[in-house]
Image (cartoon, rainbow, N blue to C red):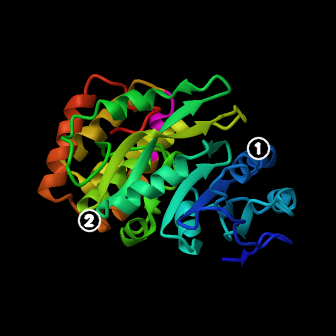
C-alpha cells in the first residue's frame, strides 16, 4: 500500500498542541467536504496531527489536501478499504490515542483534550463514544439517547456509561487496545461495523463507554450514494455469526430472510451478500466470553422495541 507524507506539508503539530492524540480521517471522492473537516480540525486548540486515508484511486483528494496545514500523512491504499481505513490510519499514528472522523465530521474544541485526560486517568478504558451533534443546527443524533440509556451498570474503573456500540466518526480509542483486537473487521467493510469492534474490545477486557462531555459534529450530505441499509442489515447478521451464540445468529438470519421475502428495501441484497460471506464468518467465528455475552443480551432486550437500522446498537 503506498503511503506518503501529504505533499509539501509534513509537520509536527505546532505548540501548544496536545501530543497525546491523532485524528484519523477516511474519505472517498468528497474533497469539498473533506476540506471543511480539515479546516475545523486545524482550528482546534489541541492541534492534532491528522492522518487521511484516501479510499479512492483518483487524484482528486491528493490534489485537494496538498499544502493543508492539518494533514501530516496521506495514505492511499491500493483498493477501497472501507472502515478498515481507520485501522490503517491508527497503525501510522505515533500517539497513544486516536480519534476518528469521517470527511463530514470533526471535533469540538477541547473534546480531544478531555478524551485524552480520561484515557490517561482510566487505564482500562479502550474506547470513548462521544455525543454527536448533527448539522448546522447541532441537533442531537438519535444515537445519543440510545447510548445514554444503556442498561449496563456503571463501573468504578471507567468513566461515563458502559456501552457496546458507538458511532464510528465520533469516538476516541486507546491505540494499543484498538490495534490489539485487530481494529475493524475486514469481513464487514462498512455499515454497522462498530458493534463487532465494541464486542472485541470488551472481550479483551477493555472498557467501552459513552461520555456526553465529548462532542463531535457531523454534517452528513446526500451525495446520491445508496446501499447503506443493505450493508447494515448484512453486517448485523455477520456480526452475530462471528460472535454470538448460534440461536442468536439463526434468529438474525431468519429475520433478514423474512424481510427479503417481504420485499423490504435492501433486504434481498443483504441476504445474498450475507450468505456469500458466511463461510468466511464461520472460519473466523470466536464466540464472546460469558460476561460479554450477558451484556449483549441485556442490550438485545433493551433494543427489542427499537428499529435497528440507521443506528449502532449500544
Residue at 28% over, 30% down:
303
Residue at 72% over, 36% down:
223
Above/below status of 154 relative to 304: below
| Labels 2 & 1 near each other (Cβ < 8 A) | no
**Viewer-proximal residue among 293 and 128:** 128
Name the residue beneath numbered marker 2. 204
The disc, 2 or 1, on the residue closer to the chain's N-terminal end is 1
**Viewer-proximal residue among 18 and 107:** 18
**Viewer-proximal residue among 262 and 19:** 19
Whether residue 83 appears in this view of the structure is no
Residue 102 appears left or right of 174: right
Q: Position of residue 206 (x, y in %)?
A: 29, 61
Asked which secondary structure carries label 2, the reply is loop
Residue 139 appears left or right of 174: right
Q: Position of residue 12 (x, y in %)?
A: 71, 72
For the stretch drawn in magenta, what is the main secondary structure? helix
Residue 106 appears left or right of 38: left
Name the residue beneath numbered marker 1. 36
Dot 2 crowding, Cα within 10 Å, few <14, some 14–19, many 20+: some
Amino acid at each position: 500500500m503506498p503511503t506518503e507524507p501529504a505533499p509539501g506539508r509534513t509537520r509536527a503539530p505546532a505548540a501548544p498542541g496536545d501530543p497525546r492524540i491523532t485524528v484519523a480521517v477516511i474519505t472517498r471522492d468528497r474533497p469539498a467536504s473533506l476540506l471543511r473537516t480539515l479546516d475545523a480540525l486545524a482550528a482546534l486548540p489541541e492541534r492534532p496531527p491528522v492522518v487521511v486515508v484516501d479510499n479512492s484511486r483518483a487524484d482528486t483528494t491528493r490534489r485537494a489536501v496538498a499544502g493543508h496545514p492539518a494533514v501530516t500523512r496521506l495514505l492511499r491504499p491500493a483498493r477501497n478499504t472501507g472502515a478498515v481505513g481507520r485501522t490503517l490510519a491508527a497503525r501510522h499514528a505515533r500517539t497513544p490515542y486516536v480519534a476518528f472522523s469521517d470527511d463530514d465530521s470533526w471535533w469540538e474544541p477541547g473534546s480531544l483534550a478531555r478524551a485524552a485526560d480520561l484515557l490517561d486517568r482510566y487505564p482500562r478504558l479502550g474506547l470513548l463514544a462521544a455525543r454527536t451533534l448533527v448539522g448546522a443546527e447541532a441537533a442531537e443524533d438519535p444515537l445519543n439517547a440510545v447510548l445514554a440509556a444503556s442498561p449496563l451498570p456503571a463501573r468504578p474503573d471507567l468513566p461515563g456509561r458502559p456501552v457496546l456500540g458507538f458511532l464510528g466518526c465520533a469516538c476516541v480509542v486507546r491505540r494499543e487496545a484498538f490495534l490489539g483486537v485487530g481494529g475493524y473487521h475486514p469481513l464487514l467493510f462498512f455499515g454497522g461495523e462498530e458493534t463487532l469492534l465494541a464486542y472485541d474490545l470488551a472481550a479483551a477486557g477493555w472498557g467501552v463507554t459513552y461520555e456526553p462531555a465529548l462532542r463531535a459534529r457531523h454534517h452528513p450530505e446526500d451525495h446520491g450514494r445508496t446501499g447503506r441499509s443493505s450493508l447494515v442489515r448484512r453486517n448485523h447478521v455477520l456480526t452475530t455469526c462471528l460472535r454470538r451464540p448460534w440461536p442468536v445468529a439463526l434468529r438474525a438470519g431468519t429475520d433478514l430472510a423474512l424481510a427479503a421475502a417481504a420485499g423490504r428495501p435492501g433486504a434481498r441484497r443483504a441476504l445474498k451478500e450475507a450468505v456469500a460471506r458466511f463461510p468466511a464468518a464461520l472460519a473466523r467465528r470466536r464466540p464472546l466470553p460469558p460476561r460479554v455475552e450477558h451484556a449483549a443480551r441485556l442490550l438485545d432486550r433493551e433494543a427489542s422495541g427499537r428499529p435497528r437500522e440507521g443506528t449502532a446498537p449500544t
